[in-house]
Image: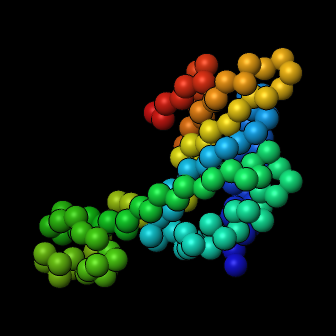
């Protein structure tokens, strides 16, 4: 079950980012899991409480956003769902394609609170995408 090691890595990334921002408790985590990523969403959800025990993420909720596997045929440029049509273009029957989506396994966002004595207890939202975090006074945007 490699999902446990994936969730442990996600927990470490969020914990480090939250510490830099002064967030003392994470309440919600949202991740993207591609159909072709090799990770099973149900196993990630099962591993989440184990990986977050005794961390600032303990008792946080996990939202998993499923990303479908979509390919673009290199012959006719038709977009098709790999999970439905397999690896063959339903338009021209060719098997040359470019994968447009579905390989993702990414942290989309997390929410937390600053409950330190000097903090204001304000909810903070951070978005993390492809190793980049943009954060501005509790509001975040993904480029």
User: Percent from the top left, x then y, of residue 101?
Assistant: 39, 60
Rendered image quadrant of residue 70: bottom left
Above or below — where is 2 with respect to 109?
below
Above or below — where is 17 with respect to 45?
above
User: Percent from the top left, x then y, of residue 121?
Assistant: 72, 24
Residue 61 seen from this side: yes
Residue 106 seen from this side: no
Residue at point 73%, 53% (across, down): 59
User: Percent from the top left, x then y, of residue 143?
Assistant: 46, 33
Give the color scheme: rainbow, by chain, secondary structure or one colour. Answer: rainbow
Residue at point 26%, 80% (across, down): 85
Residue at point 77%, 52% (across, down): 58
- Judged left or right of residue 114, residue 34 is left
Rendered image quadrant of residue 93: bottom left
Residue at point 82%, 58% (across, down): 53
Rendered image quadrant of residue 77: bottom left
Look at the image and tell me in which quarter the N terminus lies: bottom right
Considering depth in this image, is 77 or 41 the residue closer to the camera? 41
- Judged left or right of residue 25, residue 75 is left
Q: So how many labels did they put on this image?
A: 0
Above or below — where is 44 with respect to 127?
below
- Judged left or right of residue 37, residue 113 is right
Considering depth in this image, is 59 or 73 the residue closer to the camera? 59
Above or below — where is 47 with respect to 19?
below
């Amino acid at each position: 079950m490699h999902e446990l090691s994936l969730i442990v890595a996600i927990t470490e990334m969020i914990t480090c980012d939250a510490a830099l921002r002064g967030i003392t408790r994470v309440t919600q985590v949202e991740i993207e899991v591609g159909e072709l990523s090799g990770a099973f969403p149900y196993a990630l959800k099962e591993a989440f409480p184990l990986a977050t025990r005794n961390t600032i993420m303990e008792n946080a909720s996990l939202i998993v956003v499923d990303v479908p596997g979509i390919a673009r045929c290199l012959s006719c440029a038709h977009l098709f769902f790999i999970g439905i049509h397999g690896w063959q273009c339903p338009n021209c029957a060719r098997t040359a394609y470019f994968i447009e989506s579905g390989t993702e396994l990414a942290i989309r966002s997390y929410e937390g609170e600053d409950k330190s004595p000097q903090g204001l207890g304000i909810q903070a939202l951070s978005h993390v995408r492809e190793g980049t975090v943009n954060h501005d006074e509790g509001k975040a945007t993904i480029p």
